Amino acid sequence: MEIKVALVGNPNVGKTSVFNTLTGLNQKVGNYPGITVDRKTGHAKINDQLKATIIDLPGLYSIQPNSKDEEVVLETLFDEKNSYYPDVVVVVAEVENLKRNLLLLTQIKDLGFPTILAINMADQMAPKGISIDLSKLSSYFKCSTVLISSKSGLGFNDLKSAIASYEYADTKPVFELTDVDETYFKGKEYKAWLNRSQNAQFNSIHKIEDTLSVSDIKRLQQKETVRRYQLIQGVLKEAYQKDINKATGWQAKVDRILMHPVWGYVIFFAIMLVVFQSIFSWSSIPTDWIDEKFAQLSAWISATLPEGKFTELLAEGIVPGIGGVVIFIPQIAILFMFIALLEESGYMSRVVFLMDKLMRPFGLSGKSVVPLISGVACAIPAIMSARNIENPKERLITMLVTPFATCSARIPIYVIIISLVIPNTTIGGFMGLQGLVMTLMYFLGFLAALGGAWLLKKMVRSEVTSYLIIEMPTYRRPQVFNVVNTMIEKTKAFVEGAGKIILALSVLLWFLGGHGPASTFGQAEELITQENKTPEEWEDEVQGFKLRNSYIGMIGSAVEPVFRPLGYDWKVSIAVLTSFAAREVFVGNLATLYNIGSQGEEETRIVERMRQEKRPDGSPMFDLATGVSLLLFYAFAMQCMSTLGVMRRETNSWKWTLIQIVFMSGLAYLSAFAAFQLLK
């Protein structure tokens, strides 16, 4: 037998850790139908007779949603016909903010589900001077209550036992709506009231027929929340005790340093510097190994398999293209490891609070920092996360400038260009110059976002004022399993997403580079004379002539005048042009272009092949001027078709989408042009 178990809880209660502990590695990540919100499901063995599909729902504070991801929870719990409708709901709470967590518990319980209250972080009770009477909580809220610690594994057997006994759970409501308004709510169910107040249209819920105005609904919602908190407060007076004399208070001391108006920013910059320096120093050995092995594989395929188009496709198209992405797995994994560590420890919420005052003069709010920080991973979910910004002006501006944040797709470009043009030296004997430049690229994206927001603030008008309200989670030691799981999950998503595009483009580029007009490409051997040339020199000249006169060479020659003022030859121009589909294909496309016609004679790695590329005058193709030009171009350019699609959907406007791409592309071109012309 297999049942469905939904995990519900406020943000920062450790719900993801509970999910990971229950499911282990038996997880699957996807999106809810019709909405780009992460959906995690996993499988767990409850006992010998019972298995469960665990559904990790987005975090929310109340069953009355204010954002799209919170609506997912409401829809999942309302629609009995959807495939994720749970048999039992586990409300995850945490010991220090139990009062706030219990509001959600009472609402879930009143929907009629078998409900379990799992109070997480039980290991923090003694250090915080907290004691909880579980029997009183269970009695008042008519549900099983267990203490758990996802850190130590404490209480998970009790949690599984409670899940296994879900059929015997008391499903009666704990709160009477008549306490809010006896005249209106007499005889009415909580589901029907939620259906009415949220304007939900689920066939399984009968509707309340009335003529309530919006203001009436808001008034009743507020009154309901107040009444529920009054009930909760009365329960906690008897069941929850906290002796503040036993609390150490060290977290407040740490907060005074990390959120200091001066030192807070210095510490944040130092942390980011360590992160990006580590991307270079820690990943150098695995990156070099991967690079070398893919070069050897291409050479082996060319030397071993029979000559023909299929061998050329493998050696010159597929292998170099995929290698151009796989080579950056170490850097991507390290980045997500640090992001997971910062989030797990509770530091990220401090960064949001710290940045609030910095955001407001630019037309943004503290909540805008969340999409900007999330944009370090990917702009698409970052733009989606702006849904929780209530102010329409701040939400629009946030979405428009979020793509300036340096997403993980830019890392392959930054890493390889910085490796080519920035010396691998140290400053003061400990600070790597390459890591410093990498850090500055991230801050450049952040400054560009602020500058763009300041300009948009002048264009978009709004009289509504918003304020930042954020909970500071308890500092906690990151769990190794959660960090590793995040690294694997995010890196896998990056490679799979980029790999599909790169494979298709690599095959296309190989075809265009290996074919051309019969009058030139097809007659290369006859048109290139062998006089005064060694066989190797003649072969190289023939291959160069073929590539230049192939279809990809013709396209490159056509677009080269547009990019020549930026310092790019026709090969780099092709890589830049095709990367408008996705930034991360730039390196893979260059690897494919440089390997076309190479005969696989040398096991040349990508970086070395790019370092050997020359201009017609014999100077290096990738010098400081061209390198800085490329860095600035990719720092500002909007080169992601998926991001454009999300922007169009979220803004419901082609106007703002086109303004965004024109502004970012124009800024990228002009900054790259200025850098090359000044440095050449």
Image: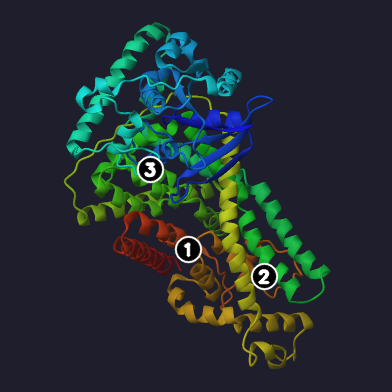
Q: Residues within 10 Å of mark 2 (few under 14, many from 20)?
A: many
Q: Amino acid at mark 1?
A: Leu
Label pair 2/3, CB-CB below 8 angstroms: no
Which one is in front, 216 or 612?
Answer: 216
Q: In x, y percent, where is residue 397?
A: 29, 51
Q: Tell which circle, 2 or 1, labels the residue nearer the N-terminal end.
A: 2
Q: Amino acid at mark 3?
A: Phe
Asked where in the image residue 665 lies, by quadrant, the reply is: bottom left
Q: Circle 1 sits on which residue?
A: 630
Q: Circle 3 sits on which residue?
A: 202
Q: Residues within 10 Å of mark 3 (few under 14, many from 20)?
A: some
* Inter-mark Cα distance, 1 to 3: 52 Å
Q: In x, y percent, where is residue 537?
A: 73, 81
* Inter-mark Cα distance, 2 to 3: 57 Å
Q: In x, y percent, where is residue 418?
A: 53, 56
Label pair 2/1, CB-CB below 8 angstroms: no
Q: Amino acid at mark 2?
A: Asn
Q: Which mark is residue 595?
A: 2
Which one is in front, 186 or 641?
Answer: 186
Q: Is residue 336 left or right of residue 248?
A: right
Q: In x, y percent, where is residue 436?
A: 49, 47
Q: Residues within 10 Å of mark 1 (few under 14, many from 20)?
A: many
Q: Is residue 633 left or right of residue 213?
A: right
